[in-house]
Amino acid sequence: MDGITIREARVEECERLLELWELVGSGPSVTDTVEHLRALTGRTGDLLLVAEIAGQIVGTVLGGWDSWRGHIYRLAVHPEQRNRGIARSLVQEIERRLRKKGARRIYALTYTEDGLAFWRASDYERTTDTAFVRTY
């Protein structure tokens, strides 16, 4: 991955993250606000990662840890930067960080057809869990 850096997102980059998620069809949702992301970077910034090329954010991934299992959300790569191993590198790094916290099971959540294709081609297995959500 020549010239690509994986690092923690910065507070001042939250608007760009939201723009990327919207570009790839992964948002916005009720929790997708600049304020929410800024708070997240302050609390669990080690689990909100970006891929950067020449100062431009080209990918993101968000990890979740509930002290029982890990979750991967918002894996997104700019369409012009796909097929370069960026998503795979983001996943490997977020997995490393979640395993370091104690995760023995990691769930991946996706909203897009491209996301489904990525996870189907990975080492992740489709579960029979049924997800429910309540939005306030």
Image (cartoon, helix red, strand yellow):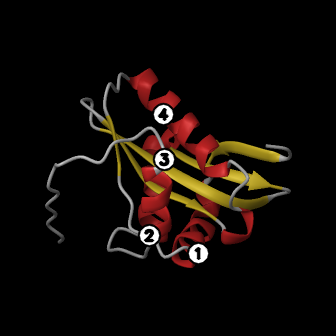
Write the residue at 58% across / 75% down.
19
**Amino acid type assigned to the residue bearing label 4 in the image:** Glu
- x, y (%) of residue 72? 41, 47
Could you give the CA–CA distance between mark 4 and mark 3, rounded to whole angstroms? 20 Å
Give the mark toward the camera: 4 or 3.
Answer: 4
Q: Are marks 4 and 2 in contact (CB under 8 Å)?
A: no
In what quadrant of the picture does the N terminus appear? top right
Mark number for residue 105?
A: none
Label located before the other in sequence (1 or 4): 1
Identify residue for label 2.
Answer: 113
Give the mark toward the camera: 2 or 3.
Answer: 2
Could you give the CA–CA distance between mark 1 and mark 3, rounded to whole angstroms? 20 Å
**Amino acid type assigned to the residue bearing label 2 in the image:** Glu
Identify residue for label 1.
Answer: 19
Furthest residue in direction front, as rendered: 121
| 106 w.r.t. 55: above or below | above
